[in-house]
Amino acid sequence: MQKLSEAAVAQINAICDRHINDKTPLMMILSDIQKEYGYVPVEVQELVSEKTGISVAEIYGVVTFYSFFSLKPKGKYIIGCCLGTACYVKGAQQIIDKFSEILGIGPGETTEDGLFTIDALRCIGACGIAPAVTINGTVYPKMEVGQVADVIAQYRSKED
Ligand code: FES
């Protein structure tokens, strides 16, 4: 298991202290850790358990239940492909398959260069523009398989 740096321990302790007296401290703590630290690995869950007295099993259960939380670091660009019913019937599976084919990763995985993560999402409330894809909050409406390569290229070109 990876050892946390002193800076990471201090950051996580500070987040726990900030929320320890909240009504629902665990959700608040885990959300802030996800936002500030980027993911919630097991060693971080153990530290949160020590600080809060909440069991690691309970923390692990929450982290793995909600797709917002991640056990592994995510890429710089998070490609969210909606696979809800409306998007599915309009070809969302082919869209996510194309992202996977070009990037060489499956849903829930991150490219080796740390740039892209593909997430399969349930309905994101944008059924009128199905199939919908989001990348770091930007929504791509009525996505077509033929657009996927260009969209990836746009994000890659930002890194040049
Ligand atoms: S099913 Fe995709 S946005 Fe609703």
Image (tube, helix red, strand yellow):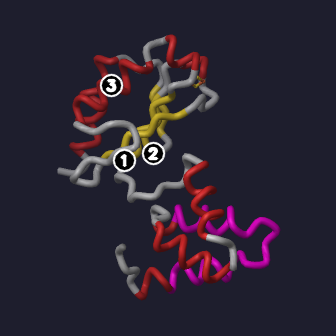
Q: Main secondary structure of the magenta part?
A: helix
Horizontal and vertical percent position of residue 142? 46, 18
Q: Residue furthest left?
A: 160
Residue behind mark 2: 136
Binning the other alpha carbons within 10 Å of mark 2 as few (below 14), some (14 to 19) or many (20 upward) gives few
Q: Residue at x 55, y 19 (%)?
A: 129
Binning the other alpha carbons within 10 Å of mark 1 as few (below 14), some (14 to 19) or many (20 upward) gives some
Q: Residue at x 54, y 70 (%)?
A: 45
Please, is residue 106 above or below residue 34 in the view? above
Residue behind mark 3: 97
Residue 159 horizontal side relative to residue 8, left or right: left
The earlier-in-sequence mark between 3 and 1 is: 1
Q: Is-magenta flag for residue 7?
A: no
Residue 79 image-quadrant placement: top left
The earlier-in-sequence mark between 2 and 3 is: 3
Residue at mark 3 to residue at mark 1: CA–CA distance: 17 Å
Horizontal and vertical percent position of residue 103? 24, 37
Q: Determine contact: label 1, label 2, CB under 8 Å.
A: yes
Please, is residue 88 above or below residue 114 in the view? above
Q: Residue at x 52, y 19 (%)?
A: 87
Residue behind mark 1: 77
Residue at mark 2 to residue at mark 3: CA–CA distance: 19 Å
The earlier-in-sequence mark between 1 and 2 is: 1
Residues in magenta, as a range = 10-35
Q: Is-magenta flag for residue 34?
A: yes
Where the N terminus falls, by quadrant?
bottom left
Q: Secondary structure at mark 2?
A: loop
Residue 110 horizontal side relative to residue 139, left or right: left
